[in-house]
Image (cartoon, rainbow, N blue to C red):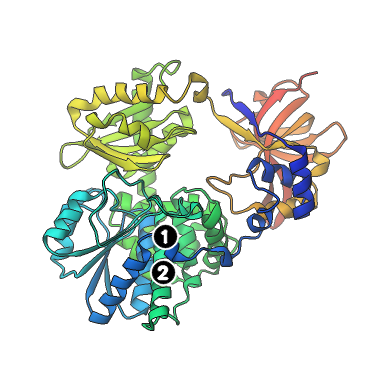
Amino acid sequence: MEERIWEFAETNDNRVQELIEEAAVTRPIALVLSARDISPGTVRDFLCPDLTNIGDPFLLPGTRAASERLWQAVSRGEQIIIHGDYDTDGITASALLASVLRKNGARVSCYLPHRIDDGYGLTAESIAKVSASNCDLLLTVDCGITSHEAAAAAQNINLDLIITDHHTPGPEQLNALAVVDPKLPGAPKEIQELAGVGVAYKVAQAFLKYGQEMGYGGEDTDLHQCLDLVALGTVADIVPLLHENRILVHHGLQVLGMQHRPGIHALCDIAGIGENLATADITYRLAPRINATGRMGDPTDGLRLLEADSILEANELARNLDDLNKKRQIIEEEVVRNAEHQIERRYDLQSARSIVVWSEGWHQGVVGIVASRLTRRYHRPSVVLTRDSNGQFTGSARSIRKLNLVAVLDECANSLIRFGGHAMAAGLSLNEENLEGFCDQFDIAVQKVLGIESMKPLLNVCGEVTFHELDDVFFQELQMLEPFGHGNPEPVFLARHVFAERRQPAGTVHTRGILRDEAGMRMQFIAFGRSPSDFPPEPWDIVFSPHINRYNGAAIPQLRIHDILPSKS
């Protein structure tokens, strides 16, 4: 089995006791809170996310100017076009703002670029397209913060432009009527990691607040019903589920579970999801189907699904998304196999700190997800590239802990035509003659940040517990830590000196059974990717995540084992 690094959180016993007393929680829950740097003063807000703690939208710079111009467009009957993106974040952001604006009398249409035909983001070509549609005001969501050429093109034709985005801005100031991005100076810390749909929500908040302050309207719009879109896009975009993201997703999951939109109902039905939605349902079932429209087809189909009024239309669109997703899975598997063969030929994984693979014919729609899979498998920052319609090599990069991709790619800028994104995910393009040089530059830049030990998977352990502490009260409290996701993963604990009372195969490569600790307490377990013959001699020290296994109507506490070592005497 692959060697993993167990990294233990620093435990302050006094802090843990304070958290137990302040929040009235069990010790394992207090260990998690302490490991996540939740103080006694903020613990109640963390455990009980409240929409009243969402900040004033005008604290996000640019929202007041954007609101003023949007209401002006409403009063003049001007045509507003929302320029979105082809992923779930961009599609949900487009649907949210279009809905709010239409409910307040705006003339709105949406433009979502086609991944292959149009490429990523706001471009001079997309400016030309929307201007041909008699656009008076162009509003971007989830894109545009580094689109200086496009902004200049809009200015040249006197097209008013409002940029809303959440990606990292460049050093130059963007020339637009209003620019809204929480990563620009002046934004409160609590909103700096919003997804594109989170920024759209803040813009909608500001629009409605401005309208009410000025007597224009907005009183009858219920933003709470839009929180399903916020949860969907936020979780799909893998931003940290902390601060305002945590609040929005917590409440958004409840709205999402109501399935009040025909499109959401149809998509949940075809994905086999009931009312009790979790973030994992978005990550593994809903978002891949919506993303499939942008990867394999026309992202407008994803938008049409979210905006569908009838269940008949929604069912047809959901079936189409499901078919596209199945097609994506087949193509993805083929690209992964080809990429792995290339890695075997080209890389010495004893020394290489990064992976860059490319091919002429890989489908552009799957390079991002393939990069994610390679990063997980090889635990290295990975770049996957394919030739685009312009003859350039275009693709996606994915990172591991402590490595900011944007900063690393900036060190390779002389080899690249363009790049942009987040610390953990980025897009890039370069010419074929620069491929080999970029590989070297990228690896050297990664080596400056990551040592060879960083190439091993890391398990962040919140602390050591006994089975006795994992009682019914603990499992009830565990739900208070949700929603789980990036920045707030499922808790991982250590238990020492445990024995297997029963161990049996589960499928072909997994194991399930019953564990017993030294005090005689028993817990069921599952170990994915580890067959019964892959266990070391007993007794064991185990690192695991506790959860409730729901199956055939039963709900049973279970430990999901991540790693096992022989106990030291």
Amino acid type indicated by mark 2? Ala
**Is the residue under label 2 in contact with that under label 1 (CB below 8 Å)?**
yes
Residue situated in front as seen by the camera: 192 or 255: 192
Density class for disc 2 (Cα within 10 Å; few <14, some 14-19, many ≥20) is many
Dot 1: what SS? loop
Dividing the picture into quadrants, the one containing residue 316 is: bottom left
Amino acid type indicated by mark 1? Leu
Dividing the picture into quadrants, the one containing residue 390 is: top left
Image side of residue 400 versus residue 478, left or right: left
Picture residue at 38% right of the left edge, 35% below the top: 405
Q: Position of residue 506 (x, y in %)?
A: 64, 37
Residue situated in front as seen by the camera: 311 or 63: 63
Image side of residue 318 versus residue 22, left or right: left
Residue picked out by circle 1: 60
Q: Position of residue 162 (x, y in %)?
A: 28, 62
Residue situated in front as seen by the camera: 79 or 75: 75
Which of the two discs, 1 and 2, labels the residue nearer the N terminus? 1
Residue picked out by circle 2: 206
* Residue lying at the far right of the rendered structure: 519
Picture residue at 33% right of the left edge, 26% below the top: 442
